[in-house]
Amino acid sequence: MKQPISRVQHGFTDYSYIPAVATAPETVGFTDEKTATTLCRVLAGNILLTSLFTRAEWGLVRAMPYKAHLMADVAVGAFAASAPWLFGFAENKRARNTFLVAGAFGLMAGLLSRPEEMSEVGATPAPSNE
């Protein structure tokens, strides 16, 4: 399957996901669900850190390989989708549905992004073995 999301586009998705998830308890209306609210902040912080440390045009430190970033996105997406049941807030429809959407978004971003590493010198993708 050809992944339609480029590395640069992936960066845009990350940096839009961060504020959306961080502010979801207020915008969606589940601040009374303390565990879900805390997890939103943790998820947003996790994506912020991995984005800042990813070896990509939008990374600040550029230490983490982009493929590792994509694997982290998939793992965080699966975690987010299962969090309502793991942490006991599945009965709260707003919180549960927010986490299902955030999880689906993370899974899609990780699985539908082309895994082309940035070259050491610039923004050119490294040759692919595919």
Image (tube, rainbow, N blue to C red):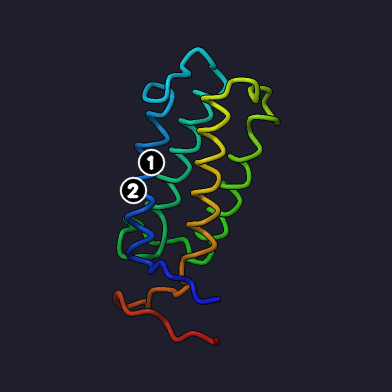
Picture layout, residue 109 above or below residue 32: below
Tell whether label 1 touches label 2 (CB within 8 Å): yes
Query: Label 2 sits on what residue type?
Result: Tyr
Residue placed at 55% from the left, 53% from the top? Answer: 107
**Rendering coords of residue 64 (x, y %):** 47, 61
Picture layout, residue 110 above or below residue 82: below
Query: Label 1 sits on what residue type?
Result: Ile
Residue placed at 55% from the left, 44% from the top? Answer: 103
User: Which label number is shown at residue 18?
Assistant: 1
Q: Is residue 43 left or right of residue 124?
A: right
The residue to which callout 2 is attached is: 15
Q: How far apart are the alpha carbons under marks 2 and 1?
A: 5 Å
Q: Nearer the viewer, residue 128 or 85?
A: 85
Q: Which quadrant, please, contains the N terminus?
A: bottom right
Q: Is residue 85 left or right of residue 125?
A: right
Residue 22 appears in which quarter of the rendering? top left
Q: Nearer the viewer, residue 42 or 78?
A: 78
Q: Secondary structure at mark 2?
A: helix
Q: Is residue 70 left or right of residue 7?
A: right
Residue placed at 50% from the left, 38% from the top? Answer: 43
